[in-house]
Amino acid sequence: MLTRIQKKTLKLKGGRFAIVASRYNARYVDAMLREAKKILLQSGAAEVKILRVPGAYEIPVVASKLARLMAPGFDAIICLGVILRGETTHAQHIGEAVTLGLTQIQLATGVPIIHEVLLLENEEQAKVRCLGKGHNRGAEAAQTALEMAKVLREIGDEEDIPF
């Protein structure tokens, strides 16, 4: 059962964020993208860079390049996509590959990678999670990005650590 989005009013003045969003299943991804961007801008973000890719499978390579070339420029990178299961195991393989890729990028670069590439059973689940009034995974992704950026700013850089 889904829980209702807890709207938070996090502020992160000057934050820089990137959103990598697939064009496949655009109806759902675009709705998540709109909400994520809205929340980031309301938080005081100085920059929200949006990059579109063909599908979910292409998200990790773009996120990786952004994290490597732009770090420490971005406070977080949000990844948005919707994978709908079909009659074969293809969707499962795509979902697992994306998850593994995004996890590796985050750990290798230290840049928070917010994973909202959804593997869903059907369009009804997509409607609830992407188009519903009480639920929007894009909004949740933006809130997570803001929280992670705040936590990492509190920790500081390696040269800030006294040991």
Image (tube, helix red, strand yellow):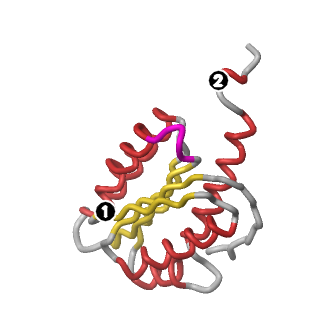
On screen, residue 149 above or below 135:
above
Q: Position of residue 22 (x, y in %)?
A: 35, 66
Q: Secondary structure at mark 2?
A: helix
- The picture quadrant where one finds residue 120 is bottom left
Q: Secondary structure at mark 1?
A: strand
Q: Position of residue 66 (x, y in %)?
A: 41, 46
Tell me the number on the disc at residue 159. Answer: none
Q: Position of residue 110 (x, y in %)?
A: 54, 36
Q: Amino acid at mark 2?
A: Glu
- Foreground residue, 95 or 61? 61
On screen, residue 37 above or below 67:
below
Q: Amino acid at mark 1?
A: Val
Tell me the number on the disc at residue 53. Answer: 1
Give the side of residue 49 with respect to residue 155, left or right: left
- Foreground residue, 121 or 154? 154
On screen, residue 86 above or below 53:
below
On screen, residue 133 above or below 80:
below
Q: Which residues are magenta?
A: 70-74
C-alpha distance separating marks 1 and 2: 33 Å
Q: Which residue is mark 2?
A: 158
